Image (tube, coloured by chain):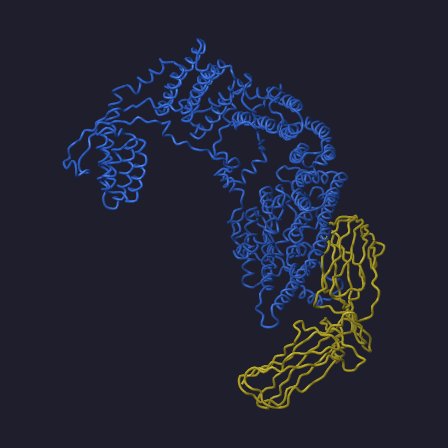
Chain colours: A yellow, B blue
Amino acid sequence: MSLTVDIQLKRSSKIYHQGEIVSGVLVLDSRSEARHDGITLTMDGIASVQLSPRSAGLIESLVNSSKPISLISQSVEVTKSGRIPSGQTEIPFELPLNPRSSSKILYETYHGVYIMVQYSLRCDIKRSLLAKDVSKSQEFIVEYKPGSGDSEEEKVVNFEIRPETLQNVRDRARIPQFLVRGHLDTSIFPLSKPLTGELTVCECERGISSIELQLVRVETCGSTEGYTREASEIQNIQIGEGDVCRGIAIPIYMVFPRLFTCATTVAPSFKIEFELNIVIIFDNDHLVVETFPIKLIRS
Amino acid sequence: MDRAAEALTPGTPSRYPYFTSLSLAISGPYKPNNNPSGRIMSVVWKIRVRQWGLEKNPLIPEPTTSHPLQGVKDRTLKQAGLVYEKKSRPTVQPMMIDPLSSVLDGPDPLSDLLGASDPLSGKAFPSASRQAMEADKDTEMAITDSRHSTWEQHRAFILSNFTTTGTLTFTSSFLQPSDSAESRAVPLHRRVVKTQTAVTERHRTPGMSGSERIRARLEQLDTLDEMSGGGVVREVGGLTQEEFTHRLNGLKQELTEAWQSDQRVKALKIAIQCVKLLSLSVPEHFYPSKFVLVIDILDTLASLVYQRLKFKSQSENFPVGGSDTGKLEAQETTRNWFYKVASIRELLPRLYLEAALLPCYSLINVQEGEQALSRLSRMIRGIGDPLMAAYARMYVCRMGFVIAPTLTQHISESIEDFLHALKQGLWPEGEADMNMGEDKDSLAARVFFPPLEWMMQCLASCAPHHILQSILRQCEEGEGLGQNLLVSSLLATFPHHFIALQALPLTHLIAGCSYPGKLQHELLSSLGVCVNQAAPPQQQQLPLLNAVWKLIARVPNTKDYLSTAGIWLEFTAKHFTSVEVNTLLGDVLKHVGTDRSHDQTHYPAMLALVSTALTNSTDPHSLFSMKHFLGLLNVFQRDSVSAGDGVTRGVVEALLTHHPGDFTDPILVQHLLTLCGALHDSINALTTDDERRQLSQLIISFIRQVNFGRDFEQQLDFYVNARAAFSNLDTVLVSLVQCVCRLAMATWNVMHSQHSGKTASFVRACAAYCFITVPSLAYSTTRLKLYLLSGTVALINNCLGQVEGNDSLYGGDPKVQQEAEQLCTTLLHNILLHIQSLTGIHEKRCGPLAFSLFWCIVTWCDLTQPQMMKVTSQIWSLVLKHCHPETVVQARDWISRHSVHQKHTSLAQLVRHGQA
C-alpha cells in the first residue's frame, strides 16, 4: 500500500522569474489502487530573517527571529477525493509565479547565514484516518529577470592603497611603505559574469606573501528595535602568490559562486549586500585590507 | 673481377678445357634395364668445347630510379642529407658504395629506437583514453619546423637534465599511512613527518566570532582546494628524487583509479594537491623535473575530463529531447567543471587546472576558450617567484598551442612578462639552493632556458614577421640574463630565413651579450647553424663573416673554438672562394699549433673541419692546392696513433667522397697513401671482419681513384708502393692485380697491339707484378681466377713465358687431371647413391635432383661421344621416372629447340625415344 509522489519541474535548471508560469508534472506512484481525500498543490515563498545573537542579544534574537515573511502563497486543489489507479500516474500542472499583492516583488532565492529567501512547491495527498498523508516538496529558484532593476551607469572604480589611506591603524610606524594602484572595471557586476579589474603593486619595501580577493556578503536585518549588520566571507581567491613583480598589472578576476550569492537586495526588513575586500598580506603576516561595496545584478 | 676478365677476353673461346677424358664408375641399381648387377662401369669423361661468345646471353641493363632497399629507411637518409648535403657531380661515383651501409647512413636502427618514447612508460593509463588522447595529439602538436621539439622530447630533455641529490618533501593527504617515514626505514635524522589540520588559520575575516569562524570553516571544507582528502595532511620529508617520483606516480595511479570508480572530486583533489607541490621552488635545479612530473598527472586528469565530456556530448542516449539534450547536458557539466576550478582558493592550482581544462572549452565556445587563454597568461603575473611563473607560462603556452595554435598575442605578452620578472632579480640573495658547486648564474641560465625556449618555439611556429621583429627589438633592449636567454632561444627556435636576414644585428647583439647565460661561442654556433641553412643577403655576407670571425678568434678554449669555427667554416665554404677558406684554416692551425700538448683531443673536431670544408666548398679542387688545407692534413700524419679512433678513416672518407674526379696530384696521393697506410697498420687481431671489409673497400676505392694519366710508370710505381703498404688485406691485393692488368691492357691499347721494346718490358714488369702478388693470397679460387686473368693479359701482350707458366701449373698437368676425373666419378657415384636412398616422403626430392644432374651432364659433357651419351640416357631415364610430366615436357621442348643448332641430334633422339 505504498504511495509516493514526486514533483518534476519542466526546467531542469529550476530557475524561474516573476510573472512566469511554473509548470511540471506530479508523478504519483502506487503499487495498488489507493483512495485519497484530495490532492493539493501549494506554492510557497518565504523570507526568514534571524537576528544575529551577537549584535542583538541572544534572547531578542530568539524572540524576534521567527517571523518569516510570506512572499507568495497559493494553493490549488488538483483533484477531489477519489482513487489513484495502481502504477504510475502523471498529473501535469501550471502555476503562475506572482506575489501576493501586486505591489510586492519576489526577492531572489538566497541562502545566507541570517537571511533566507526560499521558494517551494508542496504536494499534499490527504488520506483517510487509517493511512498517513503523503506530501512532498520541491524547491525552485527565483531570480530577477535579466535587465530588471535600475540601470545605473557602469563606472570604473579606481583605487590607490597607501599607508596614508588606511584607517584603523594601531601602530602606524609598523606599516611598511607601499603603493598599490588599480581599478575595478565597474562597481555593478552581473552575477553571470566574472568580477574583473586590475591591480599593480607600484612599490613596496616589504616582501609580499599573498594578494587575495575576498567576497563578503553583508546581511542587515532590521526590526522596530533597530538592526543588525553581519558580514561573512563567501569566497576567497588568491591572485598574487609570493613577492609579485613591481609595476606590472595583475588581473583581478573572480567568478561569482552560484551558491551564497544573489542580486543585491534591499527589502523593508532586510538587506543583502556584497563587498569585495582586496587583502594584501606581507611576508611578516601583517595584512592590509581595502573594502569596496559592489552591487550584484542580473543581466 | 669477372667482368674485368671478360672485358679482357672478348669473344675468346675458352682455352682451358681442363678435363678431357675421365672414367666413371657407376653402380647398378638406378638403371635396372641396362646393368642389373652392381658392376662398376667405366666412363670416359669428355668435356664439350664451349663457344662462350655465342652462348652468352647478354644482360641488358635497365635504368632504375630507386634503390630497392631505400624505401625502408627513407627518413634516415633524408636526415643524413642535412648533414652531408652531397652535391651531384658529373663524375662517376668514385666510392664503391655498399648498398647496406649506405642505406644506414644515419644512426643505426637500434639508436633510432632509443629516440622513440618508451611505450611502457605510460602504462598507468587506461588504454582506450590513451588512444583517444594520442589521436588528439596528432592534431595538437603539429609543430612543423624540424628543429622544434615536441612536448615529449622537451619533457625527456628536462627530466634528464634537472636532477637532484638532495632531499625533497612531499605533502599530500592522499599518502598512505604506510608511506610514512617510519615504515620506510628512513634514517632517523632524515625523518620529517608532520601532520596538520586541514584548514589554514590565516585566511579569515577579521572580527568573526567563534561560532562564525566554525561555520566559515565548515563552508571552507566544502570548497575544493582544502586538503580534506583524508582529512589529514601528511608531510614526508627526506625523500630522494626516486622516492619522490615514485610517490607522484603512485598518486597518478590513484587519480586514475579514483576516476574510474566515479570519485571525480577525489581525482580533482589529487590533481590540486600535486600542483601545490609546484608552489615550492627549492631546490631550483629539481624544479623543472618536478614540473614535468606534475604536468603528467595534470594531463592525465585533463584527458579523463575531456574524454568524459566529449563522450557525453556525443552520446544520444537521452530519453527526451533528442541528441541536443546530450550536448546541452555536456555543456552544463563542462561549466560546472569550470565553476569548481574557479573556486579553488590558491592561485597556482587554479591556474594550472584551468589551463589543463582549456581544451574543454571547445565543447562550449571556442572563443571563450581563447579569451580564457589570454586571461590565464596574464594571471601568471601574480606569481611572484620568477621560476614558478616561468614554468606556469610554459604550461599555459603549451595548452594554448593545443586549443588555438594561431594565437600569438598571449605568447609575446608572456615573453615580455618573463623578461620583466627576470629583471626584478631572480631569487633573494642566499636563498637559492646550490647544486654541487654550480654557481647561481649558470643555474639560473639553465633552469630558465627551457620555458623560454618553449614559448619562443610556439611563437616562431606561427607568428607573423613583425612579431618576430618585435622580439628582436626586445633582445636589443634587454640586459643581463634575460637578454642572453632571449638571444639564445631566438637563435634556437626562430625560422632560419628570419635569422639569416638579421644575422648582422644579431652578431652585434652576441658581441654585446655578456655572461651570465650561454657562452658567446655557443651563441655564435647557433647563429652559424642558422645561416648555414638559409643564406643571408649577398651584401651582408662578408661583413657578417668578418664580424663573426673577430669574435671566434677570441674564444679562449680550443675545443670551443674548433666547434664554432667548424660551423662557420661551412658558411665560408658555401659562400666564398677557397682563398677565404684557406685563411680561416690558417687561423685554425695557428690556434691548434699553440696548444700542441692537447693535439690528439682535437682530432675529431679538426676532422670535422676538413670534412666541412670539402663538403661545402664550391670549388673543392682548388682547395687541395691550398697551403693551410694541406697543412691541416699534415697534422693528422704527424702520428699514427689516431688511426685507431676513426679520425684518419674519416679524413680519408671525406677526401675520397669530395674530391672531384681522380687523384692526379702526386703530393696528395702520397698524403693519402700515408693515411691509408696508417689505417692498414691499425688492423690487428681484434679487428672484426666487417671492419676489415670496410677498410679494404675504402682503400680499394682510393686506389681506383688514383690516375696519373699517360704516366704508366708512375702508376705502376704507385701500385708497387700500395702493395707494400697494404700487404695484409687480400681484397686490396686482388684489386691491385686487377689494376695492374688493366694498366697492361691500357699499354697494349696505346701501342695498338704492337709493343715497342720499352713497352714490352713494361708489360712484362706488370705481369711479373701479378705473378709475385697472386701467390700471397689466401683463397685458392681467387688465386686461380687471378692467374687466369693475368695469364690472359700476359698472353695478349706476348709475354709467353708467363702464360706457359700458368698452363703448366694447371691445365696441362696430368696429375691434376687425373685427380679431377676421380673426383667427378666419386661425386657422380655419391649422387646416384643418394638418389637411391631417398624413399618414403623424401622420394619427391629425387625428381629435382636427377633433373639437375641431367642438366649438368648435358651442359658440360661432349655428347657426341657415345660414352657420355650413354650416361646421359641413363640419367634421363631417372628423370622420366621421378619428374613431373610437365617438367619433362618442358625440358624436352627446350632440348629439341636447342639441339638443332648445337647439332645434338643424338640427345634429341634420346629425348624423343624416352617419350615413345
Residue at the spot x=43%, y=29% of the render? B688
| Outermost left residue | B37
Q: Classify B218 as above or below B695.
A: below
Residue A161: percent from left, percent from top = 82, 55
Image quadrant where residue B774 sits: top left
Q: In what quadrant of the picture does the N terminus of chain A appear?
A: bottom right
Figure disc tally: 0
Residue at the spot x=26%, y=30% of the render? B863
> From where the camera sits, is residue B724 visible?
no
Residue B103: percent from left, percent from top = 50, 36
Image quadrant where residue B38 sits: top left
Residue B197: percent from left, percent from top = 63, 60
| Residue nearer the viewer, B495 or A260 | B495
> From where the camera sits, is residue B33 visible?
yes
Q: On the rendered structure, is B207 left or right of B122?
A: right
| Outermost top residue | B757
| Residue nearer the viewer, A55 or B481 | B481
Q: In what quadrant of the picture does the C terminus of chain A appear?
A: bottom right
Residue at the spot x=68%, y=75% of the render? A140
| Residue nearer the viewer, B863 or B801 | B863
Q: On the rendered structure, is B308 left or right of B218?
A: left
Q: On the rendered structure, is B840 left or right of A131?
A: left
Residue A189: percent from left, percent from top = 78, 64
Image quadrant where residue B487 sits: top right
| Residue nearer the viewer, B726 or A171 | B726
